[in-house]
Image (cartoon, rainbow, N blue to C red):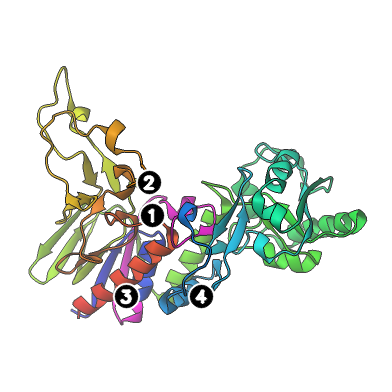
Amino acid sequence: MSKTVVVIGAGAAGVAAAWSAHREGARVTLVSRGVGASALGGGAVDDVPWEQRPRAAAPLDPDLEAFSGALGAWRIHGSQLARAATLAGRIRPARGLDRSLLDLAALPAGRLLLPRAPRAGWAADSLAAALGDAPFARSRNLELTPVNIPVLLHEDERRMPDGELAARHDDDERLDWLATRLREGASRLGSAVGVLLGPWLGAAAARAERLSSLVGLPTGEVLLGVGSAAGMRFEAARDRLLDKLGVKVVRARATTIERHGDRFRVALEQITLTARAVVLATGGLVGGGLRYAPPERLADGDLPPRGGLPFSLSVDAPVTLASRGAMLEVVSSLHGPELDETAWPNPSEPGVLEVVGVRCDGVRAGPGLTAAGDVIADRPRTLLEAVASGIRAGREAARSSG
């Protein structure tokens, strides 16, 4: 058997692992079913939690740059941090952004236009007031200005989800119509340094760069926390990359991973795959790779029938779960952990729900078995951390399968 690697999970970590293993000459099969955390992302690309973001950015690893270039979904800067306007009215730093998001750090001083649109969740006047009061906007003399420029073409666009409106802008004629309205409106209003819109600029690919070229001004999206069109664009970019690499994609749920000699058997719902190495990139609690399953869920009456671990992996695999540097053991209480005390972060440490995962030595979860992304215990839950661990996991998996 040649180098064969099975990657379980198609989020950022899984795609990075597949890309990395392919670069090492492995034949890769990627298994995925369902939407994970990467597809729900708003488009911010972070290497550390943004609330802890230092003022300067460390040099980006060349492998991260290479993967980002291959994926083509993000703009990641060197030492210059990007700044995204959030729909919550804050301006927050990021190491990079989805290619349709507007980077406020790249704008000069002046008026940034927010077109009004009769859509739920888009209140240009309130958003402009909140963003204009942000310290970054004040320090850069950015004037956030709500304006009457039509951005909706059809009546049904008032009510459709953001993703559907974003998909309409995949069409060149629809994008050209929007560009004409924005260009005419900006010209009528006088000087402006950019245009900020909702998360509507493309579903199959980012359309902000072409729109900016047509308008003659930097034009892009606001950052939405969860469920943005940026997640759809990531999935589309992922599918293009996997197809280009020739990675076999199996749409199924993995149920069991078992080691037999020098090979693994990965049981899916209908078939079984065989490989020399496996990468677990199933995601954490948010992505569904880990489950919160305390013993009391089995209670029938006063007490559950037995004690047990409060968390479980979504696939039965020969790994150990850990949190905060310690292995998870069967709880002495039949009622599981006291989440009021352990779940939430405090000044000295994150909450258990943020860090629980597979215990690893680097990315190694066991012989021939590596892990990547949010499924690893005690690692920051950021996009670039997931990618970096995916690259390492894929490389190690390919090399151990030779």
Ranked by sequence position, the earlier of labels 3 and 1 is 3
Question: What amino acid type should be assigned to the residue bearing mark 1?
Answer: Arg
* Residue 38 numbered tag: none
Give the residue displayed 51% in from the left and 54% down from the top: 231
Q: CA distance from mark 2 to mark 1?
A: 10 Å
Image coords of residue 11 (percent x, y): 40, 59
Give the residue displayed 25% in from the left and 74% down from the top: 396
Image coords of residue 247 (percent x, y): 37, 71
Q: Are marks 4 and 1 in contact (CB under 8 Å)?
A: no
Question: What amino acid type should be assigned to the residue bearing mark 4?
Answer: Gly
- Which mark is in front, 4 or 1? 1
Q: Is residue 196 magenta?
A: no
Q: Are marks 2 and 1 in contact (CB under 8 Å)?
A: yes
* Residue 21 numbered tag: 3
Identify which residue, 210 or 204, lies in the foreground. 210
- Which mark is in front, 2 or 3? 2
Q: Are marks 2 and 3 in contact (CB under 8 Å)?
A: no
Ranked by sequence position, the earlier of labels 2 and 1 is 2
Does residue 39 show up? yes
Question: What amino acid type should be assigned to the residue bearing mark 2?
Answer: Val
Magenta span: 21-49
Give the residue displayed 72% in from the left and 38% down from the top: 126
Quadrant of the image for the C terminus?
A: bottom left
**Quarter of the image holding residue 384?**
bottom left
* Residue 69 numbered tag: 4
Identify residue for label 2: 286
